[in-house]
Amino acid sequence: MTLLTIDGLKMYYRSDDGYVRAADDINLELERGQTLGLVGESGSGKTTIARSVIRLLPDNAEVIDGSIDFDGTEITELSERALRKQIRWQEVSMIPQNAMNSFDPVYTVGQQIVQVIRYHEDGVSKKEAKDRGRRLFGELGIDPDRVDDYPHQFSGGMAQRAMIALALCLEPKLILADEPTTALDVVIQDRILETITGMQEEINSAMILITHDISVVSETSDRIAVCYGGRIVEQADAETIITNPRHPYTLGLRNAFPDIGDTDTDLVSIPGTPPELVDPGEGCRFAPRCPFAVDECWDVTPQPEEFDDGHIVECHRADEADELRERAEQKETWEEVRERPSQPQGAGGRR
Amino acid sequence: MGLREYVVRRILQLVLTLWALVTLLFVLFRMVPGDPTTRFVMEYPTDAERQARIEELGLNEPLYVQYLEYMGQLLRGEFGDSTHYREPVSQLIFPLFMNTVVLMFTALLIAYTIGILFGAAMGWLRGSRFERGGIVAVLMARSSPEFWVGIILVWLFVFQFGLFPRSGIGGYGGELTMNFVDRYVNFDFLRHLFLPALTGAIVYLATPALLMRNTMLEVLKADFVEMKKAEGLPERTVLYKHAARNSVLPLVTVAAIATGAAMGGSVIIETVFNWPGVGREMVASVSRNDYPVAMAAFLLMGTSVIVMNFVADLAYLYLDPRVKYE
Amino acid sequence: MSLDTPSESTAAQAEGGTESIDRRKLRWRRRLNALRSWGSLLKEDRLGQIGLAILAFFILVGIFARPITVEIGPVWSQVQPFSLAPHGYTDRVATEGLHGPTWAHPFGTTDLGRDVLSQVIIGTRATLIVGTIAAFMAVFIGANVGIVSAYYGGWVDDVLMRITDIVYGVPFLPFAIALVFILGATLVNVIVAIVLILWRGTARVVRSQVLSHKQRPYVESARAIGASDFRIMYVQIMPNVLPLISLYAAFAVAWAVIAEASLSFLGLGPQGMISWGEIIYDVRSAGALREAWWWVFPPGIAIMLFVMSVFFIGRSLEKVVNPDLRHGK
C-alpha cells in the first residue's frame, strides 16, 4: 500500500538572481514499511525533496507545482498548525546527520524526549514519557540512566543512538534519515545503520534514507532514487540500480565507491562540479560532466522513460546502457571530460 | 592555564585595577590648577580656619605622605569628613549609594527583561517589518541622551498628564536612617521610582535587544533549532524555550558589565529627577568643592564598575564550562 | 569584502625591494573594493541612506551656521560668508522673554529674549567639533594601541592591555565631570576628558582582529621578505582592519556627542560656545521646562537625530565588517 506519493513536485528557492530549482519535476512513491534510498552529491536536491514531506524548508522555499500525498493528506495544502500537530514527528520524524548539534545543549536528552511526547500525545505524564525514553534507550543499547545526561556528555555514536530514540518515540510511519551515519566513525557506521533498520522493521515504519554514498543504500534500501541537479535522474529497485544502471551519473557514482561493482576497477570520481540551479536552461543538467554527452544532450532536456518494471531513467542514451556501462568502468573515459572544452559550439543556456 | 590559576590571575588584576582607580582619583583631585589646597578649604571664611582645616586634612604634608595617608584611610573604610555637611563621608554616602543601586537595578531589570524578549523576537522574525521597525525604535531610544528621555517623560507624565511626581524619592526621602524595607517598600516610593527607572530602562534597552537579536541570528543557524521545528513544536516553544534560551548566555556577562556601568551612568538621571543618589551627590559636591564626598562617590561608582566587570568574567566561566581561558 | 582577500595575497607575493606600480595599484583597488562594497550595500540599506542624509544636513548647517573668519595676525579673511542663523546666540531679539513660536522666531524665544532657532543652528557646530575631533582622536589612539599590542605581543601586549583594563574600570561620565570641573570647562578639556576614556573600546576590538590577521599567510610572507614591523602593521594589516576601525569611529562619534551633551546639560560644557546640551541646561536653570516646550524640544530632537544618523551609518558599516548580518541568503 502506498504511503507517500510525490507527483510532479517543483520546489524552488527564491533568490536575488531568480529561482533556484532545488527540486524540479520530482515523482516518487514509497510503500509502507519500505526504505527508499535518495542518493546524490551535496546540492543535488535530495535533502530538499525529503524535507518537502514535512515542509521543513527555509522561508524562501516555494512550491511552484505538484503535490505531496502522505497517507491521504495533501501536505502542500495543509495548515501550519495541522502540519505541526499531525504530521511532524507524529507521522514523520527525522534522524539528522549531526545528532550532537541537533539536541538543544541546555536540556538533557530525556527532557527533550519528554517534551516531544507530551506535546503530541495528550494525557501522558512526565513519568510515563520518561519511562518510554528509558525503554527506548535500553533497546538501542544505551544505559537507560543516561536519559538524564546533557547532549555534550554523549559520544558521537551514543548521541546518534539517542537521536534514534527521539525519532522513534512516537512510532512514526515515516523516518527521514538524512546522512545518519556520515558524521560517525567508519567502524560504528554499520552498527548504527543496522540499529536504525532493525528498529524500523519493529515498528513497521517506512524510511527515506538520504546519502551521498551509494554503497550505504545498496544494502538497506528497497528502492533507490538517484538525484542530480534537482532532478531524479534514475530510480528503480535497489537490485536494478546496482547491477543494471542506465544513467551515466549512476555509473559514475558506482565507480566512486569501492564496495559495489567490480572490485578490480580503480576508484574514479566524476570530474566537475554540480550545476548552477538558477535558470539552468534547456538541456541535460549532467551534460557538462558526462563523458557520453552528444549534441542532443546540450539542447534538449531528457524526459523520464520507463524501462523494465519501475526503472525510470532521464537520459537520451539510456537505451545504449550496456555499451556505456563498459566504457564507464574505464578511468580514461572520465578523464577525457576534464580535457574537453566546457561547451560545444552552438549550445545555448550555460556557460 | 588551569581554572584556579585563571581565577587567581583575575583577582590580582582586580586588585591592580582598584589600586589604579584609587591612585587616579588621588592624582585627579590634586591636579587642581594653582594651589591645590585652596579649593579644599574655600568654604571656610577666615585664614585661621582655612589653615586649621589644611592641617586637619594633612594638605601641608608632602604629596607622598598625603598619598600614603589617603591609602591607609581607604583601607580602613574611611573617606574623611565632608567639608559641606561637616560629618563623616562614610555615614552619608552609603544610604545615597543604596538609593542609586535601587534605582539602577530596577531600570536594568526592566531593560533586560523587555530587551531580551524583544531582541529574541527581532532575531526570530529576521527581515520582517517588525524587525526593521524594532531596530529603528531601539536605535532611536539609544540615540537619546538620558536627560532627553527623562525630560520627555517628565513633560508627558508630569506636566501633561500629572500622573507622577516630578522629582525626589518620596515623602521619606530625607529620612536616611530608616531601614531598608520602610524606605523602599511603599507606594509613594514606587511612584517616585517610576519615571527615573523608566528613563534608565529606555536608554539601556538597546544593548540587550540588539545583542540578543545578533546572538539569536547565530543560534538560529544551529541544527537543533531546525530539529525542534521538525519535532512539530509550536513556534513560540522553539523561539523562547530553545533558541532564546541558548542566546541568553552571552547576555549574562553583558548584564553584569552594564550593572557596573549603570552605577556610574546614574549621574544624569539622578540630576534630572533630583534622585538623592551618589551620582547627583557627586556633581553637587564637586561644584561645592566638597572633595572628600566627591572622591568617595567617584570611588563607589568606579568600584562598582570594576567589581561587576570581574563578576562578568567569572559568571561566564561558571555558565559555560566549555569556555577556554586564554 | 570577498574581493580583498585574494588581491591581498597577490599583493604580498608581489612584495619586492621596490614598490612596483602594480602593487600600489592592487592595494588601492583593494581599498576601493572595501569602499565599493559598502557603497553597493548602502544602495539597499535604507537606514544607512537616511543616516547619511541626516548627517550631511547637519554638516551643512554647521558649516553655514555663522560666517567663518580666518585670522592670521593682522590679516583676516572671511572664508565662509553665509549666515544660516538669523541671529547671534546671545542677541536679544525680543523685549519680552519666553515667547512661543512666531513667524519671526519659528522656535520661539528664550527667557532672555534670544532666538531659539539661531541657538540650535549655531549649537550644531559644538556637536560637530566635539564629535569629530574627540572620536577621531579616540579611535586613533585606540587603533594604534590595538595594533601595537597585538603585533608585538609579550610584555608590550601585557602592559597595554592592563592599561586598557584599568581604563575600563573608570566610570565614563563621573570621570569626565571631575576632570572638566577641576581643569575648567573649556573645549579642549571636554575633548580630552572624552578621549581619555573613549579609546578603550577600539583598542580591544582592533587588538583581537589584528591577532587573527597576524596568523594569515600574507603577514608571514611579508615578514619573510624582510618588510619592517612598521610596514607590516600599517601597510599590510591596517587596511584589513580599516572597516572595523571606521565602524568604531562611527560609534565613537555617537558616544562623544552624547557625552558632550551630557556634560553641557550639567553646565560643564565648553565655555564661549552654545551647544544643544547647554540650551537644555539653560531651560532647566530658567525653570521653564513646564512652559517652554518650544525651547527644549528642538535641541533635544537635534541631538537625537544626529546620534541616530551616526548609528544608522554604523549599522550599515557593520554589515561590511560582519557579512553574516546581511539580510537574505
Image (tube, rainbow, N blue to C red):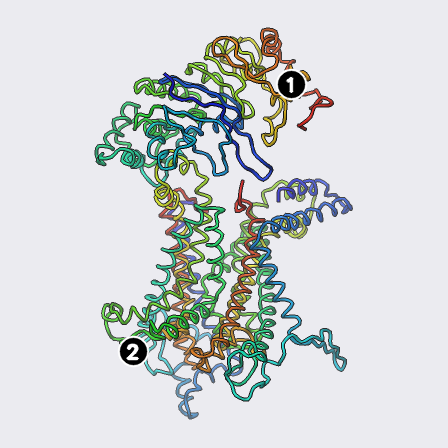
Q: Secondary structure at mark 1?
A: helix
Nearest to the observer: residue A144 or residue B294: A144
Using the image, name the chain to which the residue with label 2 belongs. B
Q: Position of residue A221 (x, y in %)?
A: 42, 16
Q: Residue at x 52, y 12 (%)?
A: A306
In the structure shown, which secondary structural element does the residue marked by tag 2 occupy? loop
Q: Which is closer to the viewer, label 2 or label 1?
A: 1
Q: Tell me where residue C276 sits by quadrant.
A: bottom right
Q: Which quadrant is home to the N terminus of chain C?
A: top right
Q: Which mark is residue A297?
A: 1
The amino acid on which the numbered mark 2 sits, given as a three-letter code, is Gly
Q: Residues within 10 Å of mark 2 (few under 14, many from 20)?
A: few
Residue A133 vs residue C136: left or right? left
Amino acid type, mark 1: Cys
Of C310 and C191, nearer the camera is: C310
Question: Does residue A227 show up?
Answer: yes
Say which chain tag 1 marks: A
Residue C292 at what x, y percent from top left? 47, 78
In the figure, is residue C23 to the left or right of A225?
right
In three-dimensional space, the C-alpha distance between marks 2 and 1, rounded to whole angstroms, equals 91 Å
In which quadrant of the rendered image does the C terminus of chain C lie? Answer: top right
C58 lies above or below A54: below
Q: Which residue is mark 2?
A: B174
Residue A105: x and y in percent read: 37, 39
In the image: residue B10, left or right of residue A166: right
- Quick one: label 1, few (<14), some, or many (20+) residues within 10 Å? many
Above or below, C284 against C244 in this view is below
Please state if A313 lies on the left or on the right of B4 as rendered: right
Q: Residue at x 33, y 34 (%)?
A: A85
Task: Report x, y in % for residue C222.
Answer: 67, 44
Marks 2/1 same chain: no
Residue drawn where x is 65% and y is 52% of the image: C234
